[in-house]
Image (cartoon, helix red, strand yellow):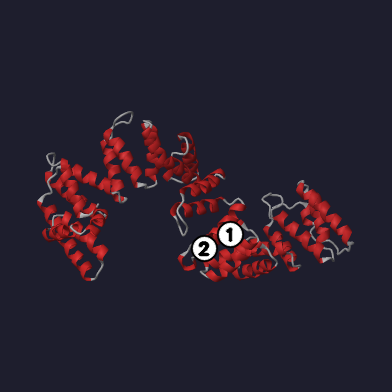
Amino acid sequence: MHIPQFIQSFFHPHVSMSRAEGIQLLDKAHQHEENDHFDKAIPMYNSLAADVDAEHAAKAQYRLGLIYMQDNEALHNPLLAFEVMEKAAANNHVQAQFQVGMMYLKGQGVSPDKEQAVHYLTAAAKGECSDAAYELGLLYLKQQDINAAISFLSQAAGNWHADACYRLGRLYLCAEHLDVPGAVENFEKAIECGHAPAMYRLGMMHWKGQGIKKNHSIAEVYFKKAAMEHYPQGAFMYALGMQRSYSGDQAAVRHYYQMALDGGVIKAALELGDIERDEAHFIEAVNYYQTASNYKISSASLKLAILLYEGEHDVPKDTVAALQLFQLASKQGNQTATLFLADWHRKQESWGDATVHVEQARQLYQVALKQGMSSAALIRHLNHQLLPVGSGLHNYLQIRCSIEYHQAKIYQENNQQDEYLTQIKASALSGHFLGNKESGRLQQEPKLSGQYVENVL
């Protein structure tokens, strides 16, 4: 690579100049640098780098290092950048120590060396370099040295380093180091520095009631701030909050969901699909559902499947594609899709090979049970669909009901009252005789009747 003559003239004979002359030359060189007149700035910095005054030399070496770190093809020279930065670091230039530490960490202009990186970053942190303290905090987090991480992050956060405040806030929400007031304090400090992720996180604390009283109104204030900073997750939650509280017009809701989707929050595509479907824009809804389905959002696959299966409005009917989507949603754990497929197979018994369809239905109903559906709910579903259970499935369900009843008795023996109530009611609804008898007795107890409905339904 050709290196211009003014870069090649790196070393100059040692010269000595007065402090006033050094400051004046530094200012002049910096002006040339800011105006991209590097052919004039570099010789001036070289002169200062060779000065016997260590302070002048360190400042000049640091500025030279930054110049050689630029992406400019004529200037970019990592080896030379490291060389001059290391000289500045040796002259106790704090920012140069930070840069050398990062160069060792990333292997820029020098072979990667974590020990040397920690050495220089620690020196810079002792010189009150917040960036160095923050990077050390991240290093120790990766090494699972949480106490050291908290120490360095706290140092940086104390100097209002926004990213450090945010990281420290996240750390204080971990169970092992739970400190909700500390998390809130650090998120608020980061927010004062305009940190959008902190706005979102503090909003989520208020939204979920995470260690503080749940308050959606306060949460939406923080989500709005994050959305104004074009933070995708904040935009999504702000749109969701407006949608649920009816506090914003549909155009605004759509705008922020789209902002979230453009920023990579794929679940926003599902919400946009619902909006378009509700407004009878079915083709647009299909497109959004397809986007979400491509990223394995099962409810999007289900909704897209329904539109294609019904083939109404402007959406072409495509039964094959719909069934494939139902299968995809079922494999992704969507119980509704699983039940649809099972019911579809039962309704096909009079067509083709009835045995195959019955077996497919039986297997899919078992999948629904594995996906968390109770045998009671499945029996109610089958009764609602007016579909015969079938002997094989019926026997399976009865065995499962029996297991549920005996599991309830084990809970009772272990004084696990809540679990016992839930299990005994489930076995009763499934049709187990003893479970039904015991459930009837429990329903006569006023204190348990409300809990019965809550647990079972």
Where does residue 351 sit, x and y in percent of width and height?
13, 39
Residue type at mark 1 is: Cys
Distance from label 1 to label 2 (Cα)? 10 Å
Relative to 175, residue 354 above or below: above
Q: Is residue 443 left or right of residue 288?
A: left
User: Where residue 171 is drawn, which disc sits there?
Assistant: 2
Q: Dot 1: few (<14), some (14–19), or many (≥20) neighbours within 10 Å?
A: many
> In terms of depth relative to the viewer, which is nearer, 227 or 337?
227
The image quadrant of residue 21 is: bottom right
Where does residue 399 sit, x and y in percent of width and height?
14, 59
The image quadrant of residue 149 is: bottom right
Do the residues bearing badges 1 and 2 touch, measured as CB atoms within 8 Å? no
Where does residue 199 sit, x and y in percent of width and height?
54, 51
Where does residue 12 sit, x and y in percent of width and height?
83, 61
Relative to 316, residue 153 above or below: below
Give the mark nearer the N terminus: 1 vs 2.
1
> In terms of depth relative to the viewer, which is nearer, 332 or 451?
451
Question: Outermost residue, front direction?
Answer: 446
Residue occupying the point 24% across, 71% down: 414
Residue occupying the point 17% across, 50% down: 379
Asked whether residue 111 is in view, the answer is: no
Relative to 248, residue 361 above or below: below
Residue on which the image places disc 1: 165
Q: Is residue 79 left or right of residue 35?
A: left
Residue type at mark 2 is: Leu
Q: Is residue 132 left or right of residue 6?
A: left
Relative to 144, residue 26 above or below: above
Asked whether residue 181 is in view, the answer is: yes
Residue occupying the point 21% across, 70% down: 413
Q: Is residue 44 left or right of residue 138?
A: right
